[in-house]
Structure formats: structure tokens, C-alpha cells
Amino acid sequence: MSRGELIIDDNQVKETALPAPGDWASEYQQQYNRGDAWAGFVLRVLEESYLYGKQAFSGVGPEMWANEFANERQQNGAVDDQWVDEFSKLHVNDWADEFGQQVGEGAFGEGSSDNWAQAYDEFLNEQVAAKQRSDSSTGVYVFSDLNPYVGHPNPLKEGQDLFRKGLLSEAVLALEAEVLKNPENAEGWRLLGIAHAENDDDQQAIAAMMRAQEADPTNLEVLLALGVSHTNELEQNAALKYLFGWLRNHPKYGTIAPPEMSDSLYYADVNRLFNEAAVISPDDADVHIVLGVLYNLSREYDKAIAAFERALKLKPHDYSLWNKLGATQANSVQSADAISAYQQALDLKPNYVRAWANMGISYANQGMYDESIRYYVRALAMNPKADNAWQYLRISLSCASRNDMLEACDSRNLDLLQKEFPLQNGERLIK
């Protein structure tokens, strides 16, 4: 997982610039000193996990995090067992192995080997195994089993039309039919990757974009998309590689990116180059977007917000950019501002699944669980395969004391959930 300015190679930390542990602990104590701190603690992690995907908890080492977590647990008393059970079902893959090691080594003390720790340890092992089993995490694209668009006379055009309408799941099928028909079609693979990213599946997005790059190695849109998706997956080395590749292959900035740097990329060097690019072309929105992504990697959220806001002045109708701004504000504990940014994204693209899910997380982070449930259900109505959204929905149902709907969630009964938690298309919950 990302912990600031880290370069990780084969699980070895190469470079780091972390905030002082005391500062983090002080901020943490201020944020989570209420009786309901446990729900806030987890939902804070969840909201950070949706930086256009998955910007996870960062800033301290696993041992410090485990100790802080244990202290909070002791100070706030026992946690409701049902709530803990819901938390134990989350997909928090990237820090799972480290936290599991801390539990196994007794970071919580001798008296902590209770049902919670055991259940969570089992969950961690399951999630690590699932990550290892995933074909798409290795860059192998996984096609849908049944595809009604196979044999369509023009699946690319159909996919483009469906994408413009916001019907992302259908667009994915049409675009899969296109790349099956024309495996070297870089545009088909690129658009397929974008559709997966907007549908909240960065692993499939990466796999598709890698095929697009194979067909067109210097495509700037593909390189930028790969950089962002690898950021979402907390794969910093890969993110830096593709962002540097974007700079290196750009006709305006290629001269400031020496090719020998590609052999050993460090965050500070890539950040410096993009700041130079911003001086060369201050009106290039893409440069500011990349800077926003880079500042998220280093947890410099104020700088990231400023970069995205500059980009939005140049591209005010870019719905994905509004979502990036919202996710960064959420990571900076500015959930109310994040909701406004997500709403802007949804106003521009009402069927934007990722923004609907992010909106739900921001409401949940403020303890507004009823509202969060409606947004999760809306996101799932558009993409029933969004596993993360199902898990976050279950958390909010439990926190809202709606245990009567947990069975509907577990069975993925969308009809019942939509009847119980209606949210009309275009309805705004922001006052």
C-alpha cells in the first residue's frame, strides 16, 4: 500500500518521506475520539480506498498502525460483534498481508486473541489468496463468458454509442466483441479499459490498456490511463513508469525526460519533471492531472486538490476529473466538499458508477448511512458486478440498523433493495 513517497521493489522499501508518527497519532486521536469511532475508522479507510479507485491508508508503518488501532480499541471499549463481522468481509487487499503479520505476531497483546482477531486473520488470508489467484492482476484480460455482441456487424461503434450513453456494462461486452474480432485494435482496447475503470474495475482496465499499449506503444491516452489505474491499485513503480512514459513520448515534453531515467525511476524525479512541464505549458490540463495523481501518492492532498482545480479551470466539463477532485478531498477528510465534486461528476454523466459509489462512501463517512445506502444501491443497479459496492452496502446496512435487509444484500436481490431504498435518476440529496 502507499505510505507517502515510497518506492517499493519486491516488497523492499527503497525511498520514503513520511510524516512524523506523533503528528499522525495526534490527528488520528482528534478525528476518532468519539464513542462511534469504530465505524468512522473503517469508513475512513473505505473512503480513502476509492481514490478513483483505491488510495488506501498511508503515512505510517504497519506496526505503528496496529498499535494505534489497538489503543483506540482499548480506549473505546468493546466493538459491536455484528459490526465487526461486517468489517471482516471487506476487500482490503494491499495491506492485508502486513496487518495479518502484525496480528499473528501479537501486536495487539496477549489478551487480544479473541473472535474478532481470529475472524479478521482468516479474512486477511482469504483476501491475499484471492489476489494471488486473480488472472487480471497479472495483466491477463478475462473475457465475459456470454456475450450477445459477438457477431455484431460493427461492435466498436456499438460500444462507443453505449459508452456515451453511460451503459458501461453493455459497452464492455460490445468492446470485448470488437477486440475478439480485431485483436490489434488499440482504440478498441483503450476504450474497453476506460469502461472498466469507470465501472470500478482497475485490474481489468489495466489488462485492457496493456493490450492497447502493445498495439500502440506511444499512445499518450493509454500511457496516462495506465499510470492512473496503477495508482488506483497502489502499484507505485508501475504508475511512475507509465507516467514517465507519457512525458517521454509527448511531443512537447520529451526533451525534458532523459531516456536513461527510465531504468531507475523515483517519485521525486518524476514529480520534478512534471512540475517543469507545468511551467512549460501552464494551460495543459493533462499535466496538472498527472501532478494531482502524483501528489496523492505522496499524501500531499492540498497540492493535489490545487492541481485538480487548475485542471478543472481548463476542462470544466470533464466528469472523471471532478471525480478525482472529490476522491482527493475525501482523502483529505473533506467529505462535504467531496460530495459536491461527485455531484458535479454525476450531473455531467448520470450513469458514472464510480462516482455513485464514491458518493455513498462520503455519506457513510459522515455517519449518514441511509443516504449512503441509496447511492450504493444506485451504483449496483448500473453494475451488479461491483463487488466492493456490495460490501460497502452491507457495512452501511449494518450501521443503519437495517439488519432486515442484510439477506437481500447477501443474495444480491437488487429488486428488493431498489424498492426499499429508491433514488430516482437525477435526484439530488445535496441541499
Image (cartoon, rainbow, N blue to C red):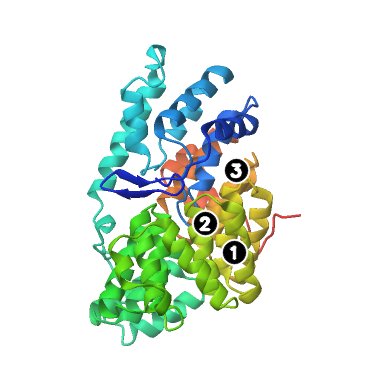
Quadrant (top left, top right, bottom left, bottom right) of the N terminus: top left
Name the residue at 41% across, 69% down.
225
Q: Which residue is denoted by mark 3 in the rendering?
A: 364
The one nearer the camera, 47 or 400, is: 47
Q: Horizontal placement of 326 versus 56: left or right? A: right
Q: Which residue is denoted by mark 2 in the rendering?
A: 295
Q: Which residue is outermost to the top? A: 111
Above or below, comparing residue 74 to residue 146 in the picture: above
- Category of crowding for the residue at label 2, using alpha-carbon neighbours closer than 10 angstroms: few (below 14), some (14–19), many (at least 20): many
Q: Horizontal placement of 67 versus 371: left or right? A: left
The kind of secondary structure element at disc 2 is helix
Identified by mark 1, the residue type is Ala
Query: What's the mark number on residue 75?
Result: none
Whole-percent x and y of residue 196? Answer: 40, 65
Q: Which residue is denoted by mark 1 in the rendering?
A: 307
Q: Horizontal placement of 427 versus 55: left or right? A: right
Identified by mark 3, the residue type is Ala
Which numbered disc, 1 or 3, marks the residue closer to the eye?
1
Above or below, comparing residue 360 to residue 169 in the picture: above
Label pair 1/3, CB-CB below 8 angstroms? no
- Kindly indicate the quadrant of the structure image that contains residue 110: top left
Label pair 1/2, CB-CB below 8 angstroms? yes
The answer to whether residue 419 is seen in the rendering is no
The kind of secondary structure element at disc 3 is helix
Name the residue at 42% across, 41% down.
410
The answer to whether residue 368 is seen in the rendering is yes
